[in-house]
Image (cartoon, rainbow, N blue to C red):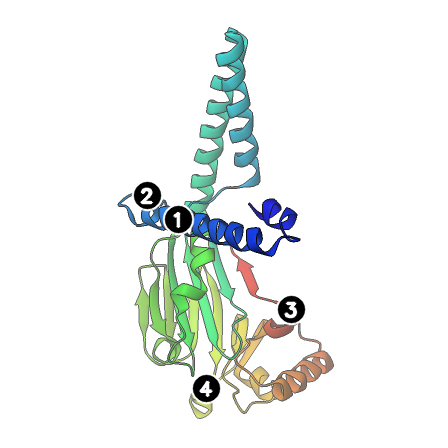
Amino acid sequence: GALLLALLSPFPLLLGWAGWAFDTFLYGLNSCIFFVEKLPGSLLHHIRFQSWELIIYFLLIMSLSAWLLAKRKSFLFISFFLCLLWTGGVALRTYKDYSRQQMIVYHSDGNSLFQFINGRDNTIWYQSKKQSFNPTSFTSDQLTAMHLHTPNILPLDMSIAYTIPDNYSGLFSQNSFGQFAGKRFVVLTPAFPLLDVPYTVPVDIAILSQNPNLKIEQVLNICTPGIIVIDSSNSAYRVKRWEDECQKVGIKCHVVSRDGAFIQKFL
């Protein structure tokens, strides 16, 4: 239809009729697609493919087609072998899914967004000044790619202020300090009670969030971290200052707004 429009461009009268016919055809085609889309069971959501699976699927289609056309048993045996290979791969992937433990600090401009993944269970902590911000929508691609269950979503200020044993994902937090997968972390926000820290606490990860009025020297008085993570809710001025201070004292620093999401795999 588009090619016909190009050929009829020197003839305005015919071009107008052809354009109307082409537009009507496209409208009818899209209407059919939208109708089918709304039928029950017409769409399958949250399907994930890995590259090796896609290759096996194509090879399986080719081998089955060859068997149907040539009627040779060798192609049927190849198809059976590919099915076994795919089944074994899926079983291995499923085993890895249930044995993984990860902590993710996402790059969400102006927001704090943390995810704790234990197998297929996961908990999300978030803080945002935008009422329209939806942490589930932001992490939907990750939920599909990792085949995760519906997350347990908690506001960040509530999560770090109270004692929360989270059996849902094996997470524990109390007074801004937390433990997950045998590793300790602390989330430092403007609400952190500096006067309530009697001694320096060893942690694996220290997260600076929501522009706390702290210097790295003060952070080191609170905890001795293996790495300092600066999430994307902090101002550029503070990020630059903290980065310079980390470099001076020789502490590893991950700036989410520059380096991308911080992903810590424990298993």
- The disc at residue 191 is none
Q: Secondary structure at mark 4?
A: loop
Residue drawn at point x = 56 percent, y = 89 percent: 214
Q: Earlier in the sequence, mark 2 or mark 3?
A: 2
Amino acid carrying label 4: it is: Val
* Relative to 195, 253 lies left or right: right
Q: Are marks 4 and 2 in contact (CB under 8 Å)?
A: no
Q: Earlier in the sequence, mark 4 or mark 3?
A: 4
Measure the C-alpha gap from mark 2 to mark 3.
Answer: 40 Å
Amino acid carrying label 2: it is: Ser
* Relative to 225, 177 lies left or right: left
The residue identified by callout 3 is 259
Measure the C-alpha gap from mark 4 to mark 1.
Answer: 68 Å
Q: Earlier in the sequence, mark 3 or mark 1?
A: 1
Q: Secondary structure at mark 3?
A: helix
**Horizontal and vertical percent position of residue 88:** 47, 29
Measure the C-alpha gap from mark 2 to mark 1.
Answer: 19 Å
Q: Are marks 2 and 1 in contact (CB under 8 Å)?
A: no
Q: Earlier in the sequence, mark 4 or mark 2?
A: 2
Amino acid carrying label 1: it is: Gly
- The disc at residue 197 is 4
Number of the front mark, 2 or 1: 1
Q: Earlier in the sequence, mark 2 or mark 1?
A: 1
The residue identified by callout 2 is 42
Q: Residue furthest left?
A: 40
Amino acid carrying label 3: it is: Asp
Number of the front mark, 4 or 1: 1
The residue identified by callout 1 is 28
